[in-house]
Image (cartoon, rainbow, N blue to C red):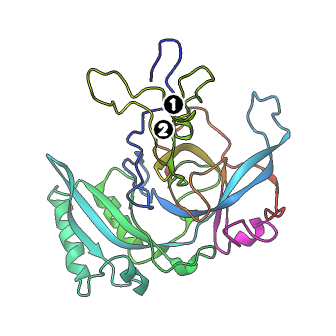
Amino acid sequence: MSHPHRPRRGSIAYSPRVRARSEIPRVRAWPLSKETKLLGFAGYKAGMTHIIMKDEVPNSLTSGMEISVPVTIMEAPVMKVAAIRVYKNTTYGATAVAEAWTTELDKELNRALTVPKKHDLPAALAKIEQLIKDGVAKDLRVIMYTLPEKVTGIPKKKPEIMENNIGGNDVKARFEYAKTLLGKTVGVGEVFKNGDIIDLLAITTGKGLQGPVKRWGIQLQKAKHSRAGSVREIGTLGPWHPSHVSWRVPQLGQTGYHQRTEFNKRIMQIGKDGKTVTPDGGFLNYGIIGNDYIIIKGSVPGPAKRLVRMRPAIRPKKQVQAPAPEITYISLESKQG
């Protein structure tokens, strides 16, 4: 409960804290971009290590010196563009009006959705082009999916399907660019580069049903409190009148497995051969990275093997950083012990 002499225990900004509906994060907003290019990609969290890099912050006490930085390494195999989808504006928000699916779909996609057997691609593209010409189509996205056989650390067969935006102000130019991607594979190096500031979206590690001490950070009851039940329960559910328990009262419930967004994470390095950054014995609970990899400064939400979506930073910081950090050492010490 709130008190005039201290802040409340735990933020209620994310209430209700319920389990995420899907393990594939949902991107609700995209940054504005003048350049016509793909704005989203996805990878799999492998684990953490540390690097030695040159500190390029001008006013830092260690500026120009080598410093140790904790990093997260993710495997980012290629993704495939399955379809183009256009939207129109209505009083209820954006509504999809047309789709154009490629005829070169992988058979594994049937595990995730019912693939249309008969789809006239030229007619669908012509319809989209007419909608753009008539001014009906106001937004355009591409539907992409992962290729499970490319992922080395996760034994899975079902691909993840997601919708990614394309930057640019002209819908027609975005459509022409999307047509060049339709049915083709895209690598992370075609979307991001070293030094980029991005946002990460992922589902956090699930902890199941937890009490209010762990879930909200309330204090344990002291020795002189009336502890009829447990020292880890709340002191009161609220007043007698009104006889209603407020949702603001910290109670037990689901902890973890929530969608969270980490803003302004820096890409330290993007590479082709993941084995060069895999520790001795492989990453704990993941194994060896055999595809493209991406090194992120700091931590990433979720456990190992969790899907992480990436987008350009939607609210980047004002200070300008160096385009690419100067890394001198990547720790490959075993994480097994």
Q: Residue drawn at (44%, 52%), measured in percent from left and top?
A: 35
- Position of 157 with respect to 91 (left or right) is right
Answer with mark 1 or mark 2, whichever residue precedes in sequence.
Answer: 1
Give the crowd class for mark 1: few <14, some 14-19, many >=20 residues within 10 Å.
few
Image coords of residue 104 (percent x, y): 38, 84
Looking at the picture, how far across and down is residue 216, in whole percent?
51, 35
The picture places residue 297, in percent across and down from the top left corner, at 67, 48
Residue at mark 1 to residue at mark 2: CA–CA distance? 49 Å
SS category of the residue bearing label 2: loop
Mark nearer the viewer, 1 or 2: 1
SS class, disc 1? loop
Q: Are marks 1 and 2 in contact (CB under 8 Å)?
A: no
Residue 282 location (% of width, % of height): 75, 70
Q: Main secondary structure of the magenta part?
A: loop
State which quarter of the image contains the N terminus.
top left
Residue beneath disc 1: 228
> The C terminus lies in which quarter of the figure?
bottom right
Name the amino acid, label 2: Arg
- Please give the name of the residue rendered at 33% of the width and 77% of the height, measured from the top-left corner: 113
Within 10 angstroms of label 2, few (less than 14), some, or many (20 or more) residues? few
* Segment colored magenta: 269-295
Magenta segment includes 140? no
Q: Residue at x 22, y 75 (%)?
A: 124
Residue annotated with mark 2: 315
35 w.r.t. 151: above or below: above
